[in-house]
Amino acid sequence: MSAPIGAAAPILCVVGARPNYMKVAPIIRALAAHEPPLRTLLVHTGQHYDAAMKDRLFADLGLPEPDVNLAVGSGSHAVQTAEVMKRFEPVIDEHGARAVLVVGDVNSTLACALVAAKRHIPVIHVESGLRSDDRRMPEEINRVLTDQISDLLYTTERSAHDNLAREGIPAGRAVFVGNVMIDSLRASLPKAVPAADLLAAAGLDAERIRGGYGVVTLHRPSNVDHADTLGPIIGALRQISTRLPLVFALHPRTCGNLERFGMLDRLDAPGFLILPPQGYLEMLGLMSGATMVLTDSGGIQEETTALGVPCLTIRENTERPITVEQGTNTLVGIAPQALIDAADVILAGGGKRGRVPELWDGRTAERIAAHLAGWLGAHEGAAAQGA
């Protein structure tokens, strides 16, 4: 039996890594709730795969089990991208594809977009046009190339359209819809796990955060893969922790490198409360009650802005400038004293509160579903006339 084509085929929705889940979950719900419903097939590439964490995240977000798991696993960027492409194409052969919907900037995003584009299947990219202007970041390469081969580009902020125009992408291909991650945040916040409950369950003294606390996440290779960068950052965090307890959700990459560099004992400080990587509802609970968040994550910059919690981003650049211009984010770089000084400003005066950006209202997925239904109908109608 041949795979279905046109409107009879599903929209293949791709997830590859943890941040993708929060973006795809509300989209799948909105496509199913559209009248008439838009049929989807959820493809998990397994780019970042931890069975326990995956099950927990899917349950937290109300995502159905993936229809297809490519089980790619880890590898170099080249190996991973190639392996996703090799395993994704047979999925199209078996199930058909009305369109391929990808989100964010991970290797799976680019890999599946490439396969679809070469098969002349419409590519829809959610979270288009974000730029750090730092080509040393693998994610930046993935963003730029995915946008170039996408037929429909949904954006989270208006500045993204300037980036796309500068790269020669026609304005008619880009649509400003808002930030779909905030849909997941708003829907999940009532279920978030309070920080005190989380610490108590982990066997840590929840009384230590009664007067306030910070949250730390650190995982970006440019920060954690080199001892001469990671060591000073940990030193700055230790100094901050003497004034504010820091709950440190320790990423495996960071932990492994600290051990490799002989620095793991630097986390043995009274102001640190060390936790393993946390689920989505646990992280929401931690962030929503925090005095500040110190991070190098992209998504957390957005989530803290939506929550109104001051964020210090330990990077030299950001692809999410709206979180700095309108939100609660401060880009501090990687110099230890700059990080300490920025934390002192928050402790002295409460830090930036900002405002929630335009269309970060929890209804982005609904806008995507409404627009996509009309766009697909028009696209397929035009294709039929040209056949």
Image (tube, rainbow, N blue to C red):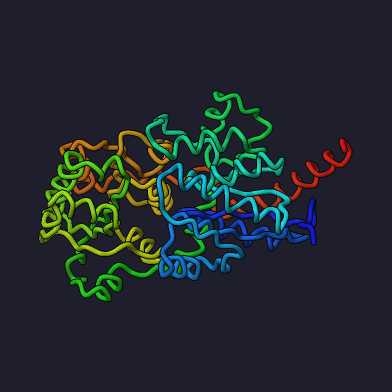
Q: Nearer the viewer, residue 239 or 327?
A: 239
**Residue 352, picture quadrant:** top left
Taking the image as drawn, is residue 187 in sight? yes
**Residue 270, picture quadrant:** bottom left
Q: Position of residue 362 (x, y in %)?
A: 55, 55
Taking the image as drawn, is residue 182 in sight? no
Residue at point 79% right, 52% down? 5
Q: Position of residue 296 (x, y in %)?
A: 32, 45
Placement of 211 over or under 336, stated as above or below: below
Q: Position of residue 322 (x, y in %)?
A: 44, 38
Q: Is residue 222 left or right of residue 386?
A: left
Q: Position of residue 238 (x, y in %)?
A: 13, 51
Placement of 191 over or under 138, stated as above or below: below
Q: Is residue 67 left or right of residue 297?
A: right
Q: Is residue 345 left or right of residue 149?
A: left
Residue at point 31% right, 34% down? 316
Q: Nearer the viewer, residue 137 or 125?
A: 137
* Quadrant of the drawing holding the N terminus: bottom right
Q: Nearer the viewer, residue 61 or 139?
A: 139
* Quadrant of the drawing holding the C terminus: top right
Residue at point 22% right, 51% down? 257
